[in-house]
Image (cartoon, rainbow, N blue to C red):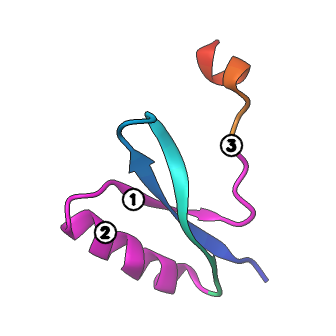
Amino acid sequence: MSEFAVLVWNTLAQAWEVWSDGYDTYSAANRDAADLCHSGRHAIVRRSPVVFPAAAQVAA
């Protein structure tokens, strides 16, 4: 069974950050992500564990 995480965009760091992790369903994670978007934040849902690319891969 998959778990899901909600990521938010950190404007100052110019990077995605895990806002909350461990959701049992996509629906629950998506509900929180939608609430964040409605409050003006950029949010996305991803499967856990979230893997961020290394800095060299981002720059290339």
Query: Which sits in the foreground, 25 or 40?
Result: 40
Q: Residues within 10 Å of mark 1 (few under 14, many from 20)?
A: many
Q: Residue at x 53, y 52 (%)?
A: 17
Kindly identify the amino acid type of the residue bearing the numbered disc 3: Phe
Indicate left or right for 34 with 26 as reference. left
Quadrant that contains the N terminus:
bottom right
Which residue in the structure is indicated by mark 1? Answer: 43
Tell which circle, 2 or 3, labels the residue nearer the N-terminal end.
Answer: 2
Indicate left or right for 33 with 22 as reference. left
Quadrant that contains the C terminus:
top right
Query: Image height check: is 55 above or below 34?
Result: above
Tell which circle, 1 or 3, labels the residue nearer the N-terminal end.
Answer: 1
Query: Image height check: is 43 above or below 54?
Result: below
Q: Residue at x 71, y 66 (%)?
A: 48
Query: Image height check: is 34 above or below 25?
Result: above
Tell which circle, 1 or 2, labels the residue nearer the N-terminal end.
Answer: 2
Please state the extent of the stretch shown in magenta in the rendering.
Answer: 25-51
Circles 1 and 2: CB atoms closer than 8 Å: yes
As drawn, the residue found furthest toward the front would be 12
Q: Circle 2 sits in a helix, a strand or a loop, which is it? A: helix
Q: Is residue 60 magenta?
A: no
Q: Residues within 10 Å of mark 3 (few under 14, many from 20)?
A: few
Q: Tell me which corner region of the image, top left, top right, bottom left or bottom right, holds residue 4.
A: bottom right
Q: Which circle marks residue 52 in the picture?
A: 3
As drawn, the residue found furthest toward the top would be 60
Q: Which circle marks residue 36 in the picture?
A: 2
Q: Residue at x 37, y 36 (%)?
A: 12
